[in-house]
Image (cartoon, rainbow, N blue to C red):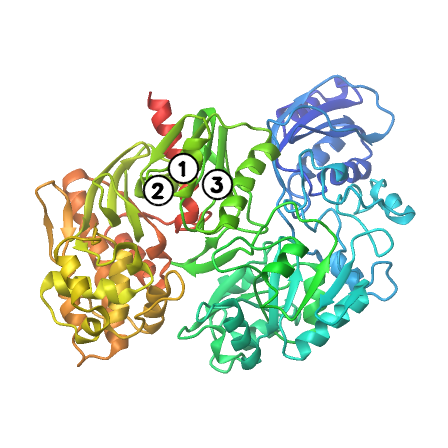
Amino acid sequence: MSAAVQDGLAAGSSAPERSALRFRIGGRVQGVGFRPFVYRLAQFHELTGWVRNHGGEVEILAEGPAERLRAFEDALLPRAPPAAAPRLLDVRSTRCESSDGFRILSSTGGDSAIHVPADLFTCDDCLTELRDPRARRYRYPFINCTQCGPRYTLIRKMPYDRANTTLARFTLCVDCAAEYTDPLDRRFHAEPLGCAVCGPSLYWHDARHAVGGNAPALAAALACLNGGQIVAVRGVGGYHLLCDARNEQAVARLRVRKGRPEKPLAIMLPWRGRDGLDYARALADLSALEAAALCGAVRPIVLTARGPQAPLAPSIAPNLREIGLMLPYSPLHHLLLEDFGAALVATSGNSSGEPVLTEPDEAEARLADVADGFLHHDRPIARPADDPVVRVVAGAVRSVRLGRGTAPLELELPRRAETPILAVGAYLKTTVALAWDDRAIVSPHIGELASPRGREVFAQVAHDLQQLYGVRAQCIAHDAHPGFPNTRWARDSGLPTHAVWHHCAHAAALAGEYPSDAPLLCFTWDGMGLGPDATLWGGEALLGVPGAWSRVASFRPFRLPGGERAARQPWRSALALCWEDGHAWPAGESLSGPLLRAAWEGGVNAPSTTSVGRLFDAAAALLGVCLHASYEGQAPIQLEALCQHAAAPIALPLARDAGGIWRSDWAPLLRALLDTRVDAAARAAMFHSSLAHAVCDQALAVRGHTGVARVGVCGGVFQNRALCGQVRSLLAAAGFEVLIPQRLPLNDAAISFGQLIEAVAVRSAH
């Protein structure tokens, strides 16, 4: 209860009969039905006044007896719509305007506080209507209200009004217009509103015929799926490729056509049972955290342990014990899954590594050799948004990929940005981020920048992020690697640029998520990133604060034969370790030939690295788990899948080099990995345990010299559940405060945010 209301009550009978309060509400209050909620709340408490959008905030003037104002204020935040995340910025007494009733006023003000709403899953009220034969929107594939439906993927510009969305060309029918203009209706100003009379519709196209209309198009798609074929479906943020997840022939055909021989495929499940998870429980051994994530507000892909009797095609996730499950989140997906009655593969409709396709013509051209038919709709998609991915790691649900519903992700900057900064991220798992004042916005997952489409979507998202929030960057932060396409784009922009070392960005992202003035010891383990010494880092521990990191620990370096080719050929990393330490590995020698050895010995295309990611590759190859990788991270993922029980670690020698850096020696691991007398699963578990203890040994050594108490882990390597869980336990037992990213992914998707944190810190220091 505010001091203003308390003062009014304390005045007793001498207080005026009516008082007035003015509220400023920030946070996520746009596109979530907050104004009609305020209207209904004011009506309930018989207050007069008004509510309006002002920039990205909501302003409220409420008039009435002090007791009613108190009840109104007490309910304003706790009873807000589920999709909202309001923050009370200010409340103060003001003069009464003697308003006649309570009104919703037109939006005013600038855009400095804009919050772009993320896409929302279909709410229970709309699902009930969708299934009700008496309802006007029975089986309408685009049903929505103020509490659900697309947002980010259909907004062309802010403010979030229908005229500024991709629905602008759809004129509301009389019935929809009545709902849209009634403050007491749950569809009041639901911008994507429509029905079968006036809204978007489905159409089907395959090699034989085209079918228009929602029901006929849906029936054609279902017939195709029931026939074991592959269907491309246009959804909220782009296309999915769907097929029967139980049908091995269909799944194998999808893999061949898409050129995706082994990468796991996500599965979308029918909503079954009281909590929606009955079908999921038949496929997976769900933990409580995984179950909550599956049916939570985001509806992400959840990585979870596959059940032993799961009725799925064997090639859904080859050589893995984990599958990716998600529940339907749009009305179209609900209809498809309910009518099909079983799980469907739902993988991104794209070429490998590229952003998901959004346009019908382009989808048909690019996926003509993949899909047997296309279920399109005519609601334009303003920008792509792939499905988010989460995984329970070290006791918490952690983001693996930002996407539909989780981005744009807003974070508060620990230090104010004096000028707006755009950060353009990494080369893989690219995101972009924008900072101004005390705000930072991270985009959804874009993907790799190797293809022209990847670079095109990257440029579009960089532009859109600035345009949507009404902020024009005056500086661009980028990776220090000079050859990255986003680095070249930054330098060609004509704006001042700020280069950030890859692993400093990892550490800064973690420091930005858990801000403190205390120094942080951050373990940044990943595949590879260019270091200031011109070598390829990937097993570093950095000590300091944003803008002032020092490398204090690492691993014994080794040279990679073939350089970047080693990322997809784990046998090269295995050979590198063997050659460095003088061990024979006949299986690897048969793959290489004498020319590669000669080039490696001569230092030709054999860069030095400390990458723990490549150590994982080497271990997987030496155990025969993965010699050739068809997707990024395949070898470490399959190596982790071998680990079923904890194992005793092998101590890795730790010593300080001439530069004062603590270095762990991987050589004892090599000898143990080559010991074929020990079961491969036991050797894999030993490998994970040994690296976890190496983290703790390095942290203790650094603490002995510096007294550091806060330790963080980040980088793609720590997405590994077996490793990260042990690391957290060991560090906590040693008395450290342990920090692990949660809102941001551990992988390179966090790099753009880290670049912002670094750039703001450095520029503030100057």
The answer to whether residue 629 is visible is yes
The answer to whether residue 445 is visible is no
Does residue 217 lie above or below 146 as drawn?
below
Q: CA distance from mark 3 to mark 1?
A: 15 Å
Does residue 73 lie above or below 219 as drawn?
above
- Does label 3 or label 1 sit earlier along the sequence? 3
Q: CA distance from mark 1 to mark 2?
A: 7 Å
Residue 584, position as x, y percentages in the image: 12, 72
Name the residue type under label 3: Val
Query: Where is the C terminus found, in terms of image quarters?
Result: top left
Q: Which of the two residues, 522 or 477, is positioned nearer the viewer here?
A: 477
Residue 29, position as x, y percentages in the image: 66, 38
Q: Which of the two residues, 459 or 634, is positioned nearer the viewer here?
A: 459
Name the residue type under label 1: Arg
Q: Which residue is mark 1?
A: 488
Residue 191, position as x, y percentages in the image: 75, 43
Q: Which residue is mark 3?
A: 432
Q: Is residue 154 left or right of residue 390?
A: right
Q: Is disc 1 in contact with disc 2, using a CB cutoff of under 8 Å?
A: yes
Q: Which residue is mark 2?
A: 483
Count of all numbered marks drawn on residues in the image: 3
- Does label 1 or label 2 sit earlier along the sequence? 2
Name the residue: 56% across, 28% down: 471
Q: CA distance from mark 3 to mark 2?
A: 18 Å
Name the residue type under label 2: Gly
Q: For numbered disc 2, what is the local secondary structure?
A: loop
